[in-house]
Image (spheres, rainbow, N blue to C red):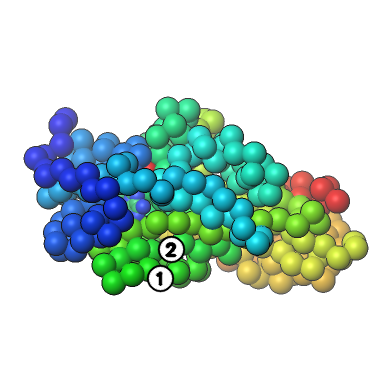
């Protein structure tokens, strides 16, 4: 099927894009990579009055590292993240995660800003933003504001962005050498959205776990941090018993749904398995 009729705008500044969004009063949608939006339009799941294409705006496609923070322009393609030497060196967990996102043609067009704005509960990048306690820069008609990962995702495919706000940048803290990490995912085929996924990031002082961050995908309406499991791990030596207890806490914390791909119980079971697997792999990194 073809999309319903729509106006098309290709502004060349973020300010002009935000002004257009404002003028359309919530009836216009931003076009980034188009990998999710265009299929939704073709199926007429969404019928925007206008598309505001971000592809002509310069300076929203970059990867920079500055004082321990990675700054990534919202229009940076998944494929650029995948092959970035800065990311491979300073935030290799992102290199690992991005390889699990979709297939090559989709990664060639899809963008980090589009993926976070879409807020698909089974997507890898929202999980990464949560695990790394990152933040986004939201650009609106009245200027910019920072939104922390914990505040960005509000429900299935729903963020706290206002109708006239644009994600312009993503900020992620880079790793120190003592960080161990792993992204564990179960999907039916490589490139499919996750049935369940867990990212683990652990920092150690000597043999002891100083800080643990665990985040999910596919096992609830939004990606969440597994805080009860993190609390078990912090201060532990990441011994098998601590990992088993953390996995049990992880199962208790998630509220998945049953759908065509898996039952809620199976997703809960996977959460425990993937949490333990991610932690065992992350602890080997020291
Ligand atoms: C077959 C298939 C398999 C896929 N598998 C996966 C997968 O395994 N894992 C995964 O994570 N993703 C997967 N995806 C989604 C893919 O990663 C998309 O690229 C991504 O979800 C959307 O990015 P985009 O740049 O194409 O955004 P678009 O489709 O252009 O836009 C998506 C939404 O975000 C809004 N938007 C875009 N940019 C911004 C911005 N800067 N600020 C505010 N709002 C914005 C748009 O208005 C729209 O509502 C898959 C997609 C397909 C079609």
Is residue 273 something one can see in this rendering?
no
Q: Mark 2: give few (<14), some (14-19) or many (20+) Cα within 10 Å.
A: many
Please report whichever mark, 1 or 2, sits nearer to the chain's N-terminal start.
2
> Which residue is tagged 1?
145
Q: Quadrant of the N terminus?
A: top left
Which element is circle 1 on? strand
Q: Position of residue 14 (x, y in %)?
A: 31, 56
Q: Position of residue 231 (x, y in %)?
A: 71, 71
Q: Quadrant of ligand 1?
A: top left
Q: Position of residue 164 (x, y in %)?
A: 25, 63
> Do the CB atoms of the residues marked 1 and 2 lie less than 8 Å apart?
yes
**Residue 33, placed above or below residue 248:** above
* Image-based side of 44 in relation to 56, left or right: left
Q: Position of residue 42 (x, y in %)?
A: 20, 35
Question: Which residue corresponds to the image point at 57% horizontal and 50% vertical from the top-left?
Answer: 64
Is residue 138 something one can see in this rendering?
yes
Q: Between marks 1 and 2, how big is the CA–CA gap? A: 6 Å
Question: Which residue corresponds to the image point at 79% horizontal and 54% vertical from the top-left?
Answer: 177
> Which residue is tagged 2?
137
Question: Which residue corresponds to the image point at 69% horizontal and 67% vertical from the top-left?
Answer: 230
Tell me how many marks there are: 2
């Amino acid at each position: 099927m073809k999309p319903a009729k729509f106006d098309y705008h290709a502004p060349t500044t973020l300010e002009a894009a935000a002004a257009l969004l404002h003028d359309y009063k919530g009836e216009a949608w931003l076009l980034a990579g188009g990998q999710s939006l265009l299929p939704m339009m073709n199926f007429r799941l969404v019928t925007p009055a206008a598309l505001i294409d971000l592809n002509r705006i310069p300076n929203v496609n970059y990867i920079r590292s500055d004082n321990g923070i990675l700054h990534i322009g919202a229009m940076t393609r998944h494929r650029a993240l995948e092959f970035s030497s800065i990311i491979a060196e300073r935030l290799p967990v992102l290199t690992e995660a991005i390889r699990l996102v979709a297939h090559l043609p989709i990664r060639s067009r899809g963008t980090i800003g589009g993926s976070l704005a879409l807020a698909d509960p089974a997507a890898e990048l929202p999980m990464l933003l949560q695990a790394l306690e990152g933040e986004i820069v939201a650009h609106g008609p009245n200027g910019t504001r920072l939104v922390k990962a914990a505040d960005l995702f509000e429900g299935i495919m729903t963020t706290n962005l206002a109708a006239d706000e644009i994600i312009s940048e993503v900020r992620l803290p880079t790793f120190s050498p003592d960080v161990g990490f792993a992204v564990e995912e179960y999907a039916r085929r490589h490139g499919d959205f996750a049935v369940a996924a867990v990212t683990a990031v652990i920092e150690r002082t000597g043999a002891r776990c100083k800080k643990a961050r665990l985040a999910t995908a596919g096992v609830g309406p939004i990606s969440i941090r597994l805080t009860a499991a993190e609390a078990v791990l912090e201060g532990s030596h990441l011994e098998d018993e601590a990992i088993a207890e953390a996995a049990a806490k992880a199962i208790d914390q998630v509220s998945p749904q049953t759908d065509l791909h898996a039952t809620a119980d199976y997703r809960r079971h996977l959460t425990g398995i993937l949490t333990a697997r991610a932690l065992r792999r992350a602890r080997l990194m020291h």
